[in-house]
Amino acid sequence: MRDLINEPDASRLIFGLRDTGYNFRTASADIIDNSIAANADEVHVRIAMTSDGRKFVYFGDNGDGMDEDGVHKAMRYGAPVRANLASLGKFGLGLKTASSSVCRRFALISRKSPDAPLAKLAWDLDHVEETGKWEMRADPIEQHEADAFDELCGDKGTLVVWSKCDRLLTKNYDEPGGANEQAAIKRLRSSLKEHIALIYHRFLDPTDARQRNVLITVNNETVEPWNPFFPERAEQVLSEKQQRIEMDLADGEGSGVATVKAWILPNSNTLTEEERKRANITNRGQGFYIYREGRLINQGGWLGVFGAHGSFEPHMSLLRIEFDFGHDLDEAFYVDVKKSRILFDPAIEEHLQKLLGNARREAENRYRRKEKERAAQVTLDHGSANVSISSAPNAKKPVVLEVDVANQTAVVRNTQGARIKLHQPVQNNVAADKVYVDAVDDITSGELWEPAFRSTGEVGHVPGVRINKNHDFYQKIYLRAGASGYSVQGMDLLLWAFATAEVDFSNPEMQPIFADIRDVVSSNLKKLLRTVPMPTDADLEEAEEPRDR
């Protein structure tokens, strides 16, 4: 009978496992996971480069440490299951696949007590390729490794050393070790600090009692936690009862509880500059933040619950969902090897859609409300239209005979008669550059415009138009046209012409009909513009520039 044992080709597999989707940040986090799983309360990362461009990454911790047998087991692809199933390690692959994704040689050095000898083993991918065997290296401890262990671990613990780092940076530099490559290494350190600050923020924050405190440094700089939910200013909108999701495993073997919180962040327009940095409100920041055993494994995005995977909605940028589960629900959420992705079962998707529906609507309403308030504060230059109208005395319009400011009525001579009494806004002492066209924020009817009789004093009223700064047409179209004076002027003249035609053909019976027409036009414009986004801050700043020049 043929031998059914069919071992994989060592070289092809070990090189193939380099491409499992890690980047430097996620690979580093997998090493840090192992340190935390080993009960370390200090983890120190050092990224170093020699003058000739050779790069090393050291991960040192003061955890439990391992003896020679423990190091051998840890370096096995598919290491034994940990005694503590709740630890951050999962598949027994992270150390190896994460390390080889960045470098071609990685060493593991450890000891369990100060008086124990250091145990070391290394995987060298070039050696595996040359021999065609799953053979580790038992090389002596090098001086830089011994020094790093003393500095980063202390009396006991574990040190991981990455060398032959051919994938640490995304490009090769003409001058290895030169200024440009040094700058790239500096950026890499900064990027790693930001990643760690988010992924382990519960461990890094001494005030967060959900996880034990762990000190993490990168090149001797302490990593400060960054909590994406900005709890000092954000509002959590789910009740305690809504926060618990009890789940049965698919195989019927047990159950578990996941928890969910919905945070609505304040609009950035209400924050100080320092608070904006801490909140970091962006489109890509919205969505689910998934935690497994207190460690973040997914940051942002809606995971198919609201829209397709990878989709973002600008009006949802204030909503962030905190979702927690333990190792007992790993199978339910299809946790991957990198612990950086989960999948929701369709039943969970449906439950979350219903559970978070109100929070989603409230976040959108708050975003739109503040967005519209910000847009309403922008001042456009309508002076050109006022000048054009005042320079056209022959334009057909009614003659205002008298006004009653107290009752907001005017008597006019128009196409309907010699003394037609109309009920319209009447305003005195209006600025000369706004007497014919003015954008205002006190129109409560929802209409885009309304006719008015206006004067720079208390007599001599003329037909004018008041434009609603809170209407979508003004905020989404007018403001985007603000940098082009002719566009704004053209729309101003059009609305003034509509308003003037209305009062020229109105009488008490016709006024409600014209009002209905304005209402329908204004309502239709809102519907047509529903999917048009609000202008960005850059658009709004550009809209105001012509006024300032």
Image (cartoon, helix red, strand yellow):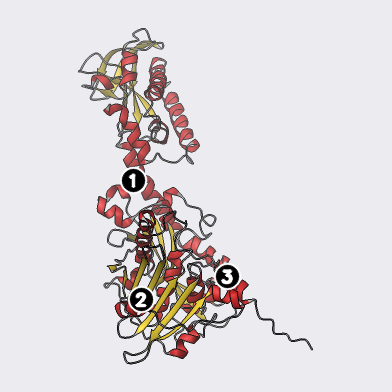
N-terminal label among 1 and 3: 3
Residue visible at 33% across and 8% down? 393
The type of residue carrying mark 1 is: Lys
Q: Is residue 516 above or below residue 172?
A: above
Residues marked 3 and 2 touching at CB (< 8 Å): no
The type of residue carrying mark 2 is: His
The numbered mark at residue 370 is 1
Q: Residue furthest bottom?
A: 115
Closer to the observer: label 1 or label 2?
Answer: 2
Residues packed near mark 1 inside 10 Å, few (<14), some (14 to 19) or many (20 plus) = some
Report which residue position mark 3 lands on: 15
The numbered mark at residue 219 is none
- Where on the picture, by quarter, is residue 112? bottom left
Q: Position of residue 454 (x, y in %)?
A: 27, 20
In the displayed structure image, the side of residue 208 where residue 515 appears, left or right: right
Task: Give the structural element (helix, strand or loop) at label 1.
Answer: helix
Report which residue position mark 2 lands on: 144
